[in-house]
Image: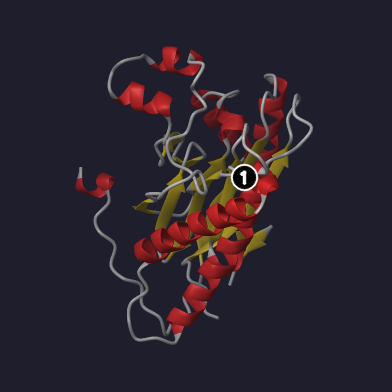
Amino acid sequence: MATPTNFTLDYALASHPGQLRPLNEDAIGARPDLGLFVLCDGLGGYNAGEIAATMAVSSLLSTLADDYRQAQSGEAPFDPRKVLAERMIEMNGVIARAAADSAAFEGMATTIVIAWVLGDRLWVAHAGDSRLYRFRAGVLEALTRDHSFSQELLDAGMVTEEEARLLPSKNLVTRALGAGGDVEPEVNDYPLRVGDVLMLCSDGLTEMVDDVQIAGAIFASVPDVQRAAQRLVDMANAAGGRDNVSVIVVRLAGRRGLEPRRMSVAEPRPSVEETAGSLSG
C-alpha cells in the first residue's frame, strides 16, 4: 500500500489516569504508515466512557485504513472530508446502538479528534473538547475549537476566558460520539511544512496547563517527540492531574522520496489561513 503522506514522521503517544481518577477513560491510537492519529476522551459522568473511547479509536483506525486502501485501486479521487465525516457519523451510530443494547453501556459517549497527514496537508476531524494544536516556528496555534457550552458562551461574548475556565459547566460538551441524536463532525484541512509539530490532547492537559506552557514544553523538547509527550503529561499531573491526560505528538521531520501512487486525493477547499518512533520511506 502506497504511503499517503509526503513527510517522514516522528511520533509519540502518552497517557496517564491522572492524580485523582483510578480509571483512564482516554484512548489513543495511530497508523503512522498512513499518517493517521486518533485520540478519544470517554465522557466522565456517563457509563462506560472508556468503552466508547476504545471502540471509536479501534474502529476508526481500521475503517479509515480500509477506505484508503480501497481508494488506491479506484479511479475516483479520495475525498478525505467526505470519508472522515461519514465514518464519524457511522461511529456515532455504532456507539449509540451498543449503549441501547446494554444497561451497562447506557449513555456512553466520547469526544474525538483525528489528525490525518495526506500529501502536503493535514486533515482534522473532531467532536467535543479534545484538541489539536500545530507548533510552527515557535508559535502554537489551536486548529480545533471546542464544542462545549463554555466555548459557546465565550464566542457570544457572555464570559471572559478566565470566567469560562471557572464555570461549573465548563466540561459540558455540545458534540460527541454516542451522546444521543445526530452528530455533526467538523472537518478542516491545513497546509503543512517540514518542522511542524502536531499535538493532539484530551482536556486533562488543557485544563491543567495553559497554551503558553504547552508551547514552552514543545519548544524545549523537540526534536525529541517522546520527551515532549511525556513532559506534557507530567506537567498536567504536577499541576494537580484532576483528569485523565493523553497526548499524541507528531513531528514532520523531513520530506520522503515520493513513490508513484495509483490513487488521487480530491483537491481540498482553500483553508481559512490560505484565504485570509521515526517513520520514513
Q: In which quarter of the image is residue 279?
A: bottom right
Residue denoted by label 1 = 106
Across and down, in percent, residue 18 comes to 73, 30
In this rendering, would 3 be left or right of 271? right
In this rendering, would 274 be left or right of 5? left
On the question of residue 202 being in view, the answer is yes
Looking at the image, which residue is at 54% across and 60% down? 36
Looking at the image, which residue is at 39% across and 36% down? 145
Specify the quadrant that holds the C terminus: bottom right
Residue density around tag 1, few if under 14, some if 14–19, many if 20 or more, within 10 Å:
many
Out of 50 and 238, give the one closest to the viewer.
Answer: 50
Across and down, in percent, residue 158 comes to 31, 15
Out of 39 and 106, give the one closest to the viewer.
Answer: 106
In this rendering, would 202 be left or right of 119? right
Across and down, in percent, residue 272 comes to 26, 46
Judge whether 262 appears above or below 210 on screen. Answer: below
On the question of residue 13 being in view, the answer is no
Across and down, in percent, residue 263 comes to 40, 81
State the colouring used for the structure image. secondary structure
Looking at the image, which residue is at 48% across and 71% down? 4
Specify the quadrant that holds the N terminus: bottom right
